[in-house]
């Protein structure tokens, strides 16, 4: 595609109308930044009319509104289905201004009407207590991307485009944002976008030259290098550069038309069965270069402002101390000629309203940007046909995540026609034993496919790229536009997306206060290859702390599940795929392990989230001498092994075994909807007996969840203590004191028996630990009694 002059140049009337819309958006943006209390400047500006917000961020706003105005023109002329993703962080006031001009903001917020009083309220709420933030947060209609943390705009855009064949996602990437690692990697998302069944992403790199106080890299490198960079990424870059509004409007209209025409050619050719390129099309992108703070004050106090970093936030500050600044602000506002833009009542004049699309074609009202409007429940397979047949506890072995993979395969198959379910992960779908999904789909791949390649396909529905950030961004964009998905990742490296997790959780939490935001499907994580199964990878792969990141979020948003076997994992998977507005974290191992519950038992246990395993207990419903609690697959195995040792050597000891699937049940009911009341908690854990708790993660987490409970002082937790190396699976538990021998010793230290009553058992356990250490260093594997252990009823 070449950059060619358009034969359909803007008419004088079109040029006037689009420029008027842009001026109106800029005026409304400044009004918000300065909390203008004189919205139509009916009288000279006075100090009491303004109260500037120091985080107003004017610098990027004119460019954002310029793009918005031109997209509106294209949507209206083409009847296009498009949404707008605002990457620059503090673009909120510009986005609010445009949604207000389109009328959507007032439809959602009737008190912010299209009149002078409504405009005043629009201005006075910005970045003000009880008002709205400076980002394109959930409060902004049409937004699926906050932008508060930079780097995720483009991956969100591609996630929105997957399986949305008629959707165009215009994604504005700020040149500061372009310097982040997640954004740099997400340019490669075009290698996964199918022109046949996906929509299109139109990246718009906005180069205004500066960050907060520094120039940006991409704005300073030579243009031939910039062009080569994006050609190398696989794009066809089109350039729009300048500072004269009239010529820039004409140029932008031409380039945007060219880009949308080229997208249509790519899609029409692919959907007609043709080919657009050897492996994938060269999708267009736009590079827009404008001055920072365009149309604002060129100089302030003799210092360059427009086209420099000083325009980044509030160009004119200290109004109380500097009357000249107040006068400059009034001149700046009047330069947009507000009397031409708004009528006597303060409403945008008809020509401006006519410039915007109508109804759902408005980007601020597009249902894809309020994905809950489009969300359809998944069709799920029956769990029973995937269940492991468990006649009695510990009678059969299975790989829990492989069983889960069979279930997800059928989910993928049953929902293939709907095109609303995807699995994402950083090259770990098969490693985490979910490979059965490849029986019904492939990995998406738009590059060359060699004869020896397996499970790569143009229409694949599994997305794998070795960037956890990009995987997370894709899935978030997919969910926010009304679909469902699963993210499979190694446990230790899920930390890479800690910050993205935080942002999505905050988005969901904010949406609870916005009734017009319809619920979206939950973000579901599978954390496998976990801390207790890293014998060949070593210390670097040993970190269960993502659970703790999750627990920092609001109770209404987060759930954490630790299924002990395949059937409980099946039940949890079935459940989370039916939830909405949640983040569900599932931690499950992939090793071939003993199975404990039948599918019917697992259903009952998972519904409660916590329960006594009578078949492993010896208290027979009476008050126990000790409670053995466990959460996680390996902690459950080691607890059962410890119980078996205790039963053999101290048969009179009354043991109660409590297994926890839903970690949130440990919290008080008033803190979490899944939490147990104090009475329920005491009924399980007693009010005064020792509790030996074997936990998958860091021990302090359990203390944090239970610190207000009656019996907290008697809860003794064993878990991961940041001890690890390249060693055997059982030795990992020994290093951290989570193994069966340490658990037995913990019980012996706390049961009320005469001194020395169990000294032989204690010596035996200590001897086993010495024997274990010597054995693995000689043989390189765990002792036969560990490898061959099984539960004895």
Image (spheres, rainbow, N blue to C red):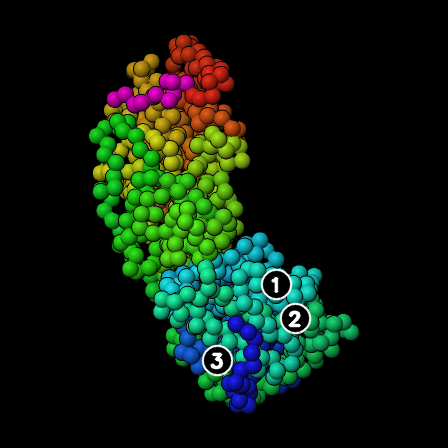
Residue where numbered disc 2 is placed: 292
Mark 3 and 1 residues: CB-CB less than 8 Å, in contact?
Answer: no
SS for callout 2: loop
Q: Quadrant of the C terminus?
A: top left
Q: Main secondary structure of the magenta part?
A: loop
SS for callout 1: helix
Mark 2 and 1 residues: CB-CB less than 8 Å, in contact?
Answer: no
One can see residue 637 in this view: yes
In front: mark 2 or mark 3?
3
Residue 512, percent across and down? 41, 59
| Residue at the extreme front | 451
One can see residue 707 in this view: no
Magenta span covers which residues?
783-793
Indicate the quadrant where residue 273 lies. bottom left
Bin the neighbour count of mark 1 within 10 Å (Cα to Cα): few under 14, some 14-19, many 20 and up: some
**Which residue is depicted at the point 46% across and 16% down?**
775
Residue where numbered disc 1 is placed: 228
Q: Looking at the image, is 690 positioned above or below residue 335?
A: above
Q: Is residue 275 left or right of residue 97?
A: left
């Amino acid at each position: 595609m070449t950059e060619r002059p358009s034969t359909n140049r803007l008419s004088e009337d079109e040029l006037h109308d689009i420029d008027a819309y842009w001026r109106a958006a800029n005026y409304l943006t400044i009004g918000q930044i300065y909390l203008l209390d004189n919205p139509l400047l009916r009288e000279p500006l006075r100090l009491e009319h303004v109260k500037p917000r120091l985080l107003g961020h004017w610098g990027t706003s004119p460019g954002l509104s310029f793009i918005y105005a031109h997209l509106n023109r294209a949507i209206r002329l083409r009847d296009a289905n498009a949404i707008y993703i605002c990457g620059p962080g503090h673009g909120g006031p510009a986005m609010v201004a445009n949604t207000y001009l389109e009328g959507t903001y007032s439809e959602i917020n009737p008190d912010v009407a299209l009149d002078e009083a409504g405009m005043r309220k629009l201005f006075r709420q910005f970045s003000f207590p009880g008002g709205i933030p400076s980002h394109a947060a959930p409060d902004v209609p049409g937004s699926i991307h906050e932008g508060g943390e930079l780097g995720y705009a483009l991956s969100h855009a591609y996630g929105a485009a997957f399986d949305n064949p008629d959707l165009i996602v215009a994604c504005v990437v700020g040149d500061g944002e372009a310097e982040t690692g997640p954004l740099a990697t997400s340019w490669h998302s075009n290698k996964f976008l199918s022109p046949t069944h996906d929509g299109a992403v139109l990246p718009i790199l906005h180069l205004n030259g500066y960050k907060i106080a520094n120039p940006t890299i991409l704005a300073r490198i030579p243009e031939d290098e910039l062009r080569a960079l994006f050609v190398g990424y696989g794009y066809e870059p089109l350039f729009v550069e300048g500072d004269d509004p009239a010529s820039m409007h004409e140029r932008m209209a031409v380039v945007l038309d060219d880009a949308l025409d080229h997208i249509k050619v790519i899609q029409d050719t692919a959907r007609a069965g043709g080919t657009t390129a050897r492996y994938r099309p060269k999708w267009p992108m736009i590079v827009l270069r404008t001055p920072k703070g365009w149309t604002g004050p060129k100089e302030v106090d003799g210092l360059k402002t427009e086209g420099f970093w000083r325009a980044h936030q509030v160009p004119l500050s200290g109004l109380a101390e500097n009357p000249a600044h107040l006068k400059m602000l009034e001149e700046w506002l009047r330069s947009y000629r507000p009397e031409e833009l708004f009528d006597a009542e303060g409403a945008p004049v008809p020509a401006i309203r006519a410039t915007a699309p109508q109804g759902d074609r408005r980007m601020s009202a597009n249902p894809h940007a309020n994905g809950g409007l489009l969300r359809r429940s998944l069709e799920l397979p029956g769990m029973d046909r995937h269940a492991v047949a468990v006649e009695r506890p510990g009678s059969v072995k299975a790989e829990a995540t492989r069983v889960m993979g069979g279930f997800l395969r059928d989910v993928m198959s049953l929902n293939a026609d709907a095109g609303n379910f995807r699995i994402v992960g950083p090259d770990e779908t098969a490693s985490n034993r979910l490979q059965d999904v490849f029986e019904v789909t492939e990995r998406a791949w738009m590059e060359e496919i060699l004869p020896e390649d397996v499970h790569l396909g143009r229409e694949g529905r599994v997305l794998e790229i070795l960037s956890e950030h990009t995987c997370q961004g894709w899935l978030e964009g997919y969910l926010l536009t009304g679909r469902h998905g699963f993210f499979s990742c190694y446990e230790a490296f899920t930390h890479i997306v800690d910050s993205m997790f935080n942002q999505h959780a905050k988005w969901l939490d904010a949406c609870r206060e916005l009734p017009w935001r319809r619920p979206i499907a939950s973000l579901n994580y599978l954390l496998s290859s976990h801390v207790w199964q890293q014998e060949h990878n070593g210390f670097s792969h040993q970190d269960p702390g993502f659970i703790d990141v999750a627990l920092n979020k609001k109770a209404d948003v987060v759930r954490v599940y630790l299924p002990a076997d395949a059937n409980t994992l099946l039940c949890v998977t079935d459940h989370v795929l039916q939830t909405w507005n949640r983040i569900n974290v599932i931690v499950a191992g992939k090793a071939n392990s003993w199975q404990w519950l039948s599918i019917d038992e697992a259903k009952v246990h998972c519904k409660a989230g916590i329960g006594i395993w009578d078949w492993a207990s010896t208290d027979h419903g009476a008050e126990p001498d000790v409670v053995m609690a466990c959460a996680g697959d390996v902690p459950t195995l080691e607890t059962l092994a410890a119980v078996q040792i205790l039963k053999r050597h101290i048969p009179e000891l009354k043991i109660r075994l409590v297994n926890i699937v839903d970690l949130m049940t440990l919290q008080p009911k008033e803190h979490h909807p899944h939490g147990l009341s104090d009475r329920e908690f005491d009924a399980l854990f007693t009010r005064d007996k020792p509790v030996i708790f074997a936990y998958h993660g860091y021990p302090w987490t359990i203390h944090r969840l239970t610190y207000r409970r009656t019996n907290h002082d008697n809860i003794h937790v064993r878990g991961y203590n940041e001890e690890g190396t390249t060693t055997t699976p059982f030795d990992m538990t020994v290093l951290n004191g989570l193994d069966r021998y340490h658990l037995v010793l913990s019980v012996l230290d706390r049961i009320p028996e005469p001194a020395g009553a169990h000294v032989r058992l204690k010596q035996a356990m200590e001897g086993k630990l010495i024997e274990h250490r010597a054995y693995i260093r000689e043989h390189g594997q765990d002792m036969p009694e560990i490898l061959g252990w099984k539960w004895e009823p």
